[in-house]
Image (spheres, rainbow, N blue to C red):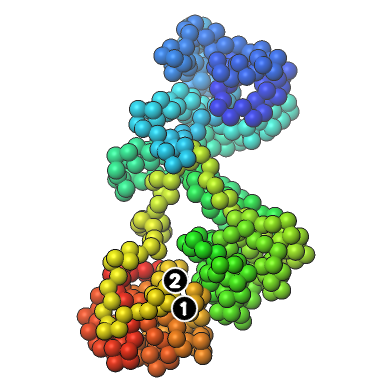
Amino acid sequence: MRALLSVANRDGIGPFARDLLELGVEVFATDGTREVLASDGIEVGPISALTAVPPLLGGQVKTFHPAVYAGILARRDRPDQLAELAEQGIGQIDVVVVNVKPFAPQVGARVVPLDEAIEMIDVGGVALLSAAARNYAGVAAVPDPAYYPQVLAELRTRGQVSAELRQRLAAEAFAAVAAYNAEVAGYLNHIAGIRFPPRLTIAFEKKSDLPYGENPHQQGAFYRETTHRSGSLADATQFQGPTPTFNDLLDLDAAYRIVSDFTSPTVAIVKRANPVGIASNDELVGAYRRALETDSVNAFGATVGINRALDGRTARLIAENAYEAVVAPGYSEEARAILAEKSSLGVLAVPATPADGLSDYGIANLDFERIGGGLLVETLDRGDVDRSELRVVTKRRPTLEELTDLLFAWRCVRHVSSNAVVLAKNAALVGVGAGQASRLVAVEIALHRAAERATMSCLASDAYFPFADAIQLAAERGVTAIIQPGGSRRDEMAIEVADRHHMAMVFTGRRHFRH
């Protein structure tokens, strides 16, 4: 039996090669892998022993040779092919161990120029894996160190790798090749300025199995974008608590997305992927108090998102309530100790610094929505609004305090399911109306949640008001200023009602639907 090793990920390759040799396997390796093994005192044959040709073009051409590919591709159930190998003096290769060097054309904020990136593209490893996987009936294509123990176990007990494992390895090898090619294609599309290519290929790797899907009778799993580099839930470290469910992850993601939209200390309390409360403050503890005040009743069983390292003072207040989970960039030792007393509380930290080499171009800036037989793709809905584009349409201009709250509310409302209306006061939400078929009903719900706090508050609507009735109702309950996209055929009626009640109203010219 022969094995060929060519690995970029050197984890475990030394013990694996040593065990192969002890099992009587004849092992060959490409130069880089062979040097690593030699440094551990493990001697294997050079690839040139098979090809009788030294590496060419600075090592770019090492394995492209009939002696290698014929030994891999020859069908073991075809006597004519085996006879042809024997006639040419070519031996069979039964185990091909290749993991491709990650394509990483970005370091920090720098995207590598095309001429440099081209040199990073691995052709030989991809070709070897594809060839071995194609002939999985007789060859084991091993694309990841995670499979080394299984391969060795079967070689020890069976003397060969089973057909079942070879088939699974082939599927994983082809998936690895597809993912690699998707990364290269994504980079080339980025360089060419193509946002929506004719053929969209994206790659994810499984992070974990989930206890179940959205409902207990559904199965679920959590996958991570292979090229993602921004700090995100997929990169989070969990310190305590049960394994997050499918629904937990939706709430955790929503909570962290919301707070990541703000630069000042901000806390979001989220339930069913909608904010129960959001608040910003100079101090984290103040932001938490104000966020909880938005709707302390419905905060029960919610998820808390924080955009600063959690301190002890705020952790004590969080520990007084029943939450599913907390997600933040980090935690002080005091905060960790306090939260540890609530063993059922999930505590997760999202890294603030993205990893080098992973891209923030391509799908990192896109959103996806599955529909029957297809996929809807769009650019991310950013919450930023250029103040120069704001248009005051009423006779009264908003005060500085009102403008501050209007912009806060506008940033919040894009995170609420449509039709969405929020009320804000002093950089905190005081009422939320989410997911309503009628915008008037969304206003009614937000006002009901706010109660007396609606007085002197500011209102944000994710889309225009088709009628003036909602503005009339808001004015009657004490709302003093409104921010909305505008664009209705009845805008003049809405402006007239606002003027009648001495309200300030600002049009953004931008809608924030969220289904």
Disc 2 residue type? Phe
**Element carrying mark 1:** strand
Q: Work out whether 509 lies above or below 379.
A: below
Q: Residue furthest front?
A: 400
Lower sequence index among marks 2 and 1:
2
Q: Nearer the viewer, residue 376 or 105?
A: 105
Q: Residue furthest right?
A: 341
Q: Which residue is mark 2?
A: 408
Give percent across and percent down for residue 343. 75, 63
Image quarter hosting the C terminus: bottom left
Give percent across and percent down for residue 363. 41, 49
> Label 1 neighbourhood size at 10 Å, few (<14), some (14-19), many (20+)?
many
**Residues at discs 2 and 1 in contact (Cβ within 8 Å):** yes
Image quarter hosting the N terminus: top right
Residue shown at 69% from the left, 67% from the top: 313
**Element carrying mark 2:** helix
Q: Which residue is mark 1?
A: 424
Quarter of the rendering containing residue 302: bottom right
Quarter of the rendering containing residue 384: bottom left
Residue shown at 48% from the left, 46% from the top: 228
Give percent across and percent down for residue 372. 39, 60
Disc 1 residue type? Ala
Q: Nearer the viewer, residue 453 or 72?
A: 453
- Does residue 167 appear in this view? no
